Amino acid sequence: MSDAHHHDHAHSDASTLTDIQKRVKALESILVDKGLVDRKVIDQIIEHFENKVGPHIGARVVARAWVSSTFKQSLIEDATKAINGEADFAEVGQHLIAVENNDEIHNVVVCTLCSCYPWDVLGLPPVWYKSAPYRSRVVSEPRSVLQEFGLELPKDRKIRIWDSTAETRYLVIPQRPTNTESMSEAELARLVTRDSMIGTSDVLTTTE
Amino acid sequence: MNSIHDLGGMQGFGPVGLEDKEPAFHVSWEGRVLGLQRSILALGLWNIDVFRHAQEKIRPIDYLSWSYYERWMHTLTATALERGLFDEEELRTGKGLSDGSSIAQKKLTMKDINKAFLRGNFERVGDSEPEFSIGDLVVTKQTYTAGHTRLPRYARDKLGTVIAIRGRHVFPDSVVDQGSEDPQWLYTVEFEGCELWGEAVDPTVSNLIDAFEPYLSRP
């Protein structure tokens, strides 16, 4: 890339941002004026996605599956039904599918066509999940992509790449680390990271 | 349509850019765009498939240059204009010049805000029986359409195995092309990596997609 190009690019980025801000404001004002959207509702939606939903929800689901084989079984049969049947979990949408990692199979989730992601258990997808490098490469060269996340799988581990091409959503149940028998469900939940539920990394082995 | 959104299997995009402690939104207008998108979808005038197809119609050079929420902004604006939610003059002035209640009755309010958080149910129960069973070998269709499809290019005209039946779902292709739900059986189909990527691929890899019945036939 030449210096001149780099310069132009940086410049156009800066002006686009201001322009975008104005245009978003205009779009919102028009729709509010017409009585089609409510600003308070938009505030609340932002609040929900910034502060309420996130990977901590999925982490609690995974931890429960680790401590209760009955729950894990129901989760694999019908994740939506299993989660919505637990009094202390918030309601999730239909057709959530849980896929379990074990010593033979490692599961990874992608949406090559857009950005389908289980928002109700993981929150908003990270930028990398929606980006061209991840969406293009993880289906055809998963091991090199997983290495970028620091995940080295055994050479004979089977890798299943789930492309979310319909209104189904996938949640990976990572493997429970060894030597965690004495940990409570709440402690276990703290080991479960967002990326481990997408399948691009392992869980933590300690909460420290 | 065969555009840049259909990224699976392309090369040359470089490493995945990871970010530590990523915020929900990187700039505040992104949140406004998300809120607008949820609010507009809740009006019930078009669904997520129409929104997705509008993104697919973004010029490839723009698709790759714009950020995710920039794409959403352009898509929301273009679709709203196309569907008569507002007109060019309103867009130019940034003011709604007429009341919108004749356009949509179902404004999202604080009372039913949960609709903005929970994904809708796209399953439609009906009389038809699924054509395929678990374990069946299937071939995906080859297609070249200007319309909408959820069959990615990398998985077209390939041999796979049905591993799950997911119910009878709204068919995105018909939603966009005909404005009808036209529910179809939905299957998870698994392909061996070498069927999709040739001998170069790691033999431990398999790929799965959710495929609607019209995408499938018997080998």
Image: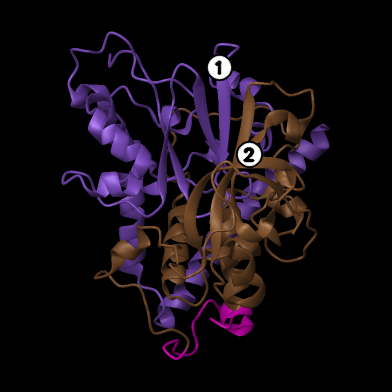
Chain colours: A purple, B brown
| As drawn, B176 above or below A98 | below
Mark 2 neighbour density, 10 Å: few (under 14) some (14–19) many (20 or more) = many
Looking at numbered disc 1 in the image, what kind of residue is underneath it?
Arg
The magenta stretch is: B82-102
Q: Earlier in the sequence, mark 1 or mark 2?
A: 2
Would residue A132 appear left or right of A20 to someone viewing this image? right
The image quadrant where one finds the N terminus of chain B is: bottom right
| As drawn, B13 above or below A118 | above
| As drawn, B165 above or below B202 | below
Rendered location of residue A60, percent (x, y): 26, 34
Looking at numbered disc 2 in the image, what kind of residue is underneath it?
Arg
Would you say residue A11 sits in the magenta stretch? no
Regarding residue B105, the answer to whether it shows in the image is yes
* Residue found 44% across the figure and 25% down from its top: A101
Would residue A207 appear left or right of B166 to someone viewing this image? left
Q: Quadrant of residue A100?
A: top left
Q: What secondary structure is marked by label 2?
A: helix
Q: Which residue is mark 1?
A: A157
Could you tell me which chain the residue with mark 2 belongs to?
A: A
Mark 1 neighbour density, 10 Å: few (under 14) some (14–19) many (20 or more) = some
| Rendered image: mark on residue A135 | 2
Would residue A148 appear left or right of B19 to someone viewing this image? right
Q: What is the distance, in whole Å, between disc 1 and disc 2 at their CAs?
A: 22 Å
* Residue found 30% across the figure and 65% down from its top: B113
